[in-house]
Image (cartoon, rainbow, N blue to C red):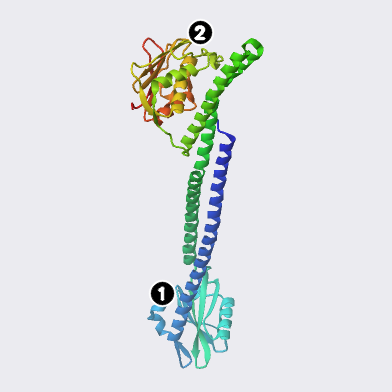
Amino acid sequence: MTSPAVRRLRRLRWTLTLLFAAATAGCLLVLATLAAHTDAHSRARELDSEVTGRAGGLARALWFDGGVLATEPLDEDELARGAEVLAALQRGPRGGVPSVPRWARPGPDRLPGPQLLSRLWGQVQDTQGTALATGPGGGGRTLRWAAAPVWDGDDIAALVVVGTDPARSGADHARLVGRLLLGCSGLVLAAAAAGHLLSGRAMRPALLGLERQEQFLTEAAHELRTPLATLRLVVERGAAAPGLALGALAEATVLSERLARLVGGLLARARIEAGTQLVELTPLRLDQLVEQCVAELPAAPPAPRGGGAGGATGDGTDSGTDGERPRVTVRPAEQPVIVRGDPELLGQAVRNLVENALRHGGGTPVTVTVEPGLVTVTDGGPGVPEQRREAVFRRGVTSGAGTGTGLAIVRWVAELHGGSARLAAAPGGGVRAELRLPAH
């Protein structure tokens, strides 16, 4: 089950991802808006420049001959060929707005209406130059119109009117806006993914620290549960029988010393896993270490949970009281077995193997054998299916052979010393647990 602290960190990660995506979206929205506005303004200026340039150039190519507008250049000029709507309008005999089409393409019916022509004429009169306006043409479409004056002496006597459709430029602008929106959406998604990845990497040390903390608490509870329960039983026994108080006190002293070593080993293991402390490997007698660990196991541990047989160990070679606990036999090697290792960590690994066999061996005798570079713990219990023998070494995995806390510690200690740990079937049934270490 996920802890509340981990859930809070995960919620914080998603919050940071959303904030990162929102900030990116806001920035991209501002940039896209500026880009779209700039593009629209640029296209409008380009369109106006094109239509005014065309109208002004054609107006300069025309002249009056005896009061009649000469339009022959409109048939030959390249500017005239590229115009969508083009007309040359001459002022009538009575003056006013030029309305007599002297030349028109595609036809007079495509020219702007009287009101728009009047407005263009007024602007030309006021500015003495080219005028611009947007309005409908004869075909019903809204065009951008430019009107340039044609001079007859000192008077403006005619207009060159050019119209162009801004829809094509608007369509190009719409396509650009669509691409901007699509690109910004993709960038926001990419930014959200990058933010989620970066926030996950940033929080990885915190999650790892929480995982190590929970792991340390779990392993501490696993290591301290039995000796604390035994210490309580010893104290209660001494309190209930005053004649046994001195013996109980001495036993409690031994148990407290063992608890102190256990706590020291737990802290050392936590520091080693956190990388704040290096393991110190020194030459030691593995056979003596195993005998000492078995001798220090509590003489009367409480009954294990889950219906397993209770376990106890005794004096180091052949310990146990029939009817109360399984018997533990230590078979040392004929010659001293020397390995390089940390005595506290190796002691925890050996104790975990023996206690695991006592707890899950079904009340059968347990045999601990020491050979060069190898410690084996064998029981005659129900055994472990082959497909489960590797899984029980993972933290949090539980099976009939043990828990993924004690055996996981054994595997970790073995690998820390360059060795290995595994389970195998014992001859005649049961489990054979092996702790292999490089020989010194």
Say which label, 1 or 2, has the lower sequence index: 1
Q: Could you say which is closer to the camera, residue 114 or residue 416? A: 416
SS at badge 2? loop
Quadrant containing the N terminus in the rendered view: top right
Considering every residue shown, the one lying at the far top of the view is 323
Q: Does residue 312 sit above or below 204 in this rendering? A: above
Q: Does residue 21 sit above or below 161 in this rendering? A: above
- Disc 2 residue crowd, few under 14, some 14–19, many 20+, Cα 10 Å: some
Residue 106: which numbered mark, if any? none
Between marks 1 and 2, how big is the CA–CA gap?
Answer: 113 Å
| Residue 369 x, y percent position in the rendering | 38, 16
Q: Could you say which is closer to the camera, residue 201 or residue 344? A: 344
Disc 2 target residue:
321
Q: Could you say which is closer to the camera, residue 136 or residue 355? A: 355
Q: Could you say which is closer to the camera, residue 155 or residue 373? A: 373
| Residue 410 x, y percent position in the rendering | 44, 25
Quadrant containing the C terminus in the rendered view: top left
Residue type at mark 2 is Thr
| Residue 352 x, y percent position in the rendering | 47, 21
